DNA sequence: CTGTTAGCGCATTCAC
DNA sequence: GTGAATGCGCTAACAG
């Protein structure tokens, strides 16, 4: 039925060795390309292995050798979020370059779930962890329970532990976006963002605040909304702002959800109303096809994953303790003028 | 420095057993909740385990017991595609319910890469595989190299092997979309799709063809484009069709890329030209904010992942051989009228 | 260059 | 109810 007509049982190195009349060690050495074995013997072994279709059991190998498992854990809140899935793609690409694969762990934004997921991945013997933390406290990602595994935090700096991290230039990107609005003459600029408790929430707000300060514009609470909500809430907040007696002439939205909420709020406005400019963090698919001009802070989420992999494997390679490192991914401002 | 001031070395069952003056077996039994152990002893063990923060080594456990690894491999072409990442989310959710996790394997649409990825995942001891096949031939997913591992194909039926699969109702969804265009009075309906060599390519075209036949409309080659291309190519094909002397009054696009290409082609048209209706397979984010009416064939990609998990674990649970099963995910037609 | 011994961490099997 | 021996598949460490 196939090229090899052997037993359907899983082959072990002993089986291969027995057919060749050699010891399992010889097979082991040949398979790993270890030197100190005759070229003729090696070829004989390799031929037999190919003929039999034998494949070494990687788990057993790892158990004995104590070497790396070539498995990296990725812990995110929700892989359906395109930013996380793109991060996953970048991470996986780099990991494969190091001979490793990625195991998924979703937390659903629940810090308790995150703890469990992390513990489980450690038990499974991952060589390292890339975590987009769900909560504010990261002490459970520290040395104790983690068998001194390398950890890289993504999109958030470590709090209470010393580990590597990969950040987006939240402050810089947000400031640039706000500067552009200012440069276009806007003085009343609304901000729709996340709560200050989140890193991105505070950093992106800080960029907004600094840009305004540079322009000599005072912060106005009525133009600031910082909530942890969905698109519906974001749309509501935008509408409320636009209904003010002296509404903002521009909006700065600090993430995807807020941008989409703002877009919907702006969508329904009558032709004769003054147009409201919109700038937001995170790129939007099909942004060029919307009939509203939009400026976005864009970056490559896959780059976060690649950078995280580099940090992980560099740390794994070095024997001496390294100080925690921090990589920041640059952002660029992209303008989508309204079509027509 | 921590609650337990033990050696930093990884603890083994022997260490726990030694501190308690019992045998490793007692610890093993207590940990697995196996019966045949005194309640007092069990509690003593569990307490010590908790105090020490000991965690059993899952790989060693699997090696000896020969039991499942609680690891499922997911092989897709590109996780950045939202349909695959949503599939991954559904799969992971279900897997966690069975105590398993998901390992990623990306192929980049390269059948050769797919073979390698599959082989590697098998070597790593996954209990099963969910594969969105990149190629046309699936024989490498058959019994031989796969240690009789359960395999579920997603979005494509098995060719040359007998395994379970989860399909989308490509034919039905496409036919419904075309029927709707017909119901709205369209007779010249263009089709932008994938090559017939792909399952979705042929099925979605078949839905189109059957709906036209039902309406007594003959197929017209000039209104049919079936290419394996990107958005740019799709847009070009759409433009070419619309430039015909008697252009189609409606377009049916068989997937995401073609829909977006068509949208761009329609976008640039002058106000005074006759509007062209558009219906497409796959939902589109922000579709309701485009200024073109759009009808889409929608379905839940996560449902594919969940169904695949069910097939996998049901097959794993049964000892007797089961015939291959086929699950089809239903589609619904969604109308996005143009805003305003 | 090749083989032998031992053991990774745990669980099956059989004693007691 | 508990413990001792044995082995999962493979590879360090040491023989020869």
Image: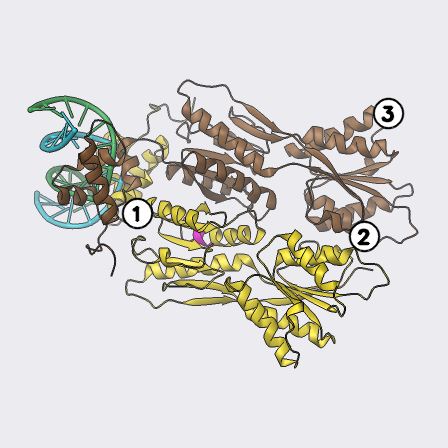
Chain colours: A yellow, B brown, C green, D cyan
From the top left corner, tell me how far across and down residue B34 is, in percent: 26, 29
Q: Which residue is the site of mark 1? A: A33
Q: Residues within 10 Å of mark 2 (few under 14, many from 20)?
A: some
Q: Looking at this view, is B254 or B222 the one in front?
A: B254
Q: Is residue A110 above or below residue A172?
A: above
Q: Residue furthest front?
A: A245
Relative placement, left or right, of A247 versus A33 is right
SS label for mark 1? loop
Magenta highlight on residue B87: no
The N terminus of chain B: image quadrant: bottom left
Q: Measure the alpha-carbon separation of dots 1 and 2.
A: 59 Å
From the top left corner, tell me how far across and down residue B85 is, in percent: 56, 44
Q: Measure the alpha-carbon separation of dots 1 and 3.
A: 67 Å
From the top left corner, tell me how far across and down residue A58 is, in percent: 33, 41
Q: Is residue A39 above or below residue A211?
A: above
Q: Which residue is the site of mark 3? A: B216
Q: Chain of mark 2?
A: B
Question: Image quarter for residue B302?
Answer: top right
SS label for mark 2? helix
Q: Measure the alpha-carbon separation of dots 2 and 3.
A: 31 Å
Relative placement, left or right, of B201 versus C5 is right
Part of the protein shown in magenta: A94-98
Q: Which residue is the site of mark 2? A: B267
Q: Looking at this view, is A259 or A224 the one in front?
A: A224
From the top left corner, tell me how far across and down residue B50 is, in percent: 25, 46
What secondary structure characterizes most of the magenta part? helix
Q: Are marks 1 and 2 in contact (CB under 8 Å)?
A: no
């Amino acid at each position: 039925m196939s090229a090899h007509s052997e037993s359907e049982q899983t082959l072990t190195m002993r089986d291969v060795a027995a057919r060749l009349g050699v010891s399992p060690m010889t097979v082991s050495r040949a398979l790993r390309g270890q030197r100190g074995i005759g070229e003729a013997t090696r070829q004989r072994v390799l031929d037999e292995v190919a003929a039999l279709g034998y494949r070494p059991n990687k788990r057993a190998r790892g158990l004995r050798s104590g070497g790396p498992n070539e498995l990296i854990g990725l812990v995110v809140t929700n892989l359906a979020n395109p930013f996380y899935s793109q991060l996953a793609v970048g991470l996986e690409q780099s990991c494969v370059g190091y001979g490793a694969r990625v195991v998924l762990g979703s937390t659903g934004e629940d810090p308790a779930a995150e703890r469990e997921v992390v513990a489980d991945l450690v038990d499974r013997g991952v060589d390292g962890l890339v975590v987009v933390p769900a909560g504010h406290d990261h002490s459970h990602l520290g040395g104790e329970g983690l068998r001194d595994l390398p950890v890289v935090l993504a999109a958030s700096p470590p709090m209470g532990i010393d580990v590597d991290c990969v950040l987006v230039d939240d402050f810089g990107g947000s400031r640039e976006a706000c500067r552009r609005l200012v440069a276009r003459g806007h003085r009343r600029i609304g901000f729709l963002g996340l709560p200050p408790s989140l890193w991105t929430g505070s950093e992106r707000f800080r960029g907004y605040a600094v840009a305004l300060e540079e322009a000599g514009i005072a912060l106005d609470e009525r133009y600031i909304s910082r909530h942890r909500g969905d698109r519906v809430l974001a749309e509501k907040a935008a509408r409320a702002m636009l209904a003010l007696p002296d509404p903002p002439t521009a909006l700065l939205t600090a993430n995807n959800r807020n941008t989409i909420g703002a877009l919907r709020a702006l969508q329904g406005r009558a032709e004769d109303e003054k147009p409201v400019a919109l700038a937001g963090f995170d790129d939007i698919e099909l942004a060029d096809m919307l009939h509203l001009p939009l400026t976005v802070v864009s970056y490559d989420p896959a780059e976060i994953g690649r950078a995280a992999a580099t940090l992980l494997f560099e740390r794994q390679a070095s024997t001496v303790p390294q100080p925690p490192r921090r990589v920041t991914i640059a952002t660029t401002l992209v303008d989508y003028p309204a079509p027509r």
